[in-house]
């Protein structure tokens, strides 16, 4: 499972280290294989990437395959979400290589933040994450209401 917020750097080749806890889980449950794609639920100014362990991604893909192919919104979603996805494997140094296309979508600079989301994790540009987090916390009424539902 993926929990917590972890700061890492992107190297000049577009590689990033995966936190030890995430890496250990990925190696134990899916041989270090994951799929990274764009966040289909990104709001304006909140672009990030989402990394799914391969078995979780396969479940998501099955649900997407069931969408009606004659629905324009479903086709657009499929084109963007699945079309931008990339299957990756942790290298020997526990890094993944993020393609220029994915880095461009999320506007990733050198400093990154990885945010655990239980069954997946997000990859954010650190400056964008800090700004979004501050905005969310300053308008935390919705946050508190949702917390009441869960906690």
Image (tube, helix red, strand yellow):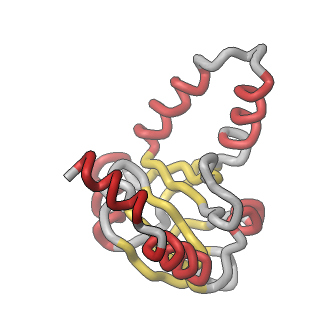
Q: Tell how many labels.
A: 0
Q: Is residue 40 left or right of residue 79?
A: left
Foreground residue among 57 and 31: 57
Quadrant of res 140: bottom left
Above or below residue 91? Residue 111 is: below
Could you tell me which quadrant the N terminus lies in?
A: bottom left
* Residue 129 rendering spot, x and y as whole percentages: 54, 75
* Residue 33 rendering spot, x and y as whole percentages: 46, 50
Please report the residue visible at 19 percent of the width from the left and 53 percent of the height from the top. 151
Foreground residue among 39 and 92: 39
Q: Is residue 86 left or right of residue 130?
A: right
Please report the residue visible at 55 percent of the width from the left and 73 percent of the height from the top. 132
Foreground residue among 117 and 36: 117
Quadrant of res 66: top right
Q: Is residue 137 left or right of residue 125?
A: left
Please report the residue visible at 61 percent of the width from the left and 21 percent of the height from the top. 65
Above or below residue 20? Residue 127 is: below
* Residue 5 rendering spot, x and y as whole percentages: 38, 73
* Residue 34 rendering spot, x and y as whole percentages: 49, 51
Task: State whether residue 93 appears in this view.
Answer: no
Above or below residue 135? Residue 86 is: above
Please report the residue visible at 27 percent of the width from the left and 46 percent of the height from the top. 149
């Amino acid at each position: 499972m993926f929990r917590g917020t972890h700061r890492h750097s992107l190297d000049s080749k577009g590689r990033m280290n995966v936190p030890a806890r995430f890496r250990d889980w990925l190696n134990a449950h899916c041989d270090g294989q994951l799929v990274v794609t764009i966040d289909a639920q990104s709001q304006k100014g909140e672009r990030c990437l989402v990394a799914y362990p391969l078995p979780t991604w396969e479940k998501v893909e099955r649900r997407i395959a069931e969408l009606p192919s004659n629905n324009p919104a479903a086709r657009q979603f499929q084109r963007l979400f699945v079309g931008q996805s990339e299957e990756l494997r942790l290298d020997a140094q526990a890094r993944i290589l993020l393609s220029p296309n994915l880095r461009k979508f999320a506007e990733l600079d050198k400093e990154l933040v990885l945010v655990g989301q239980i069954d997946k994790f997000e990859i954010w540009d650190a400056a964008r994450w800090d700004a979004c987090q501050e905005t969310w916390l300053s308008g935390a009424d919705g946050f508190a209401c949702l917390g009441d539902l869960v906690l």
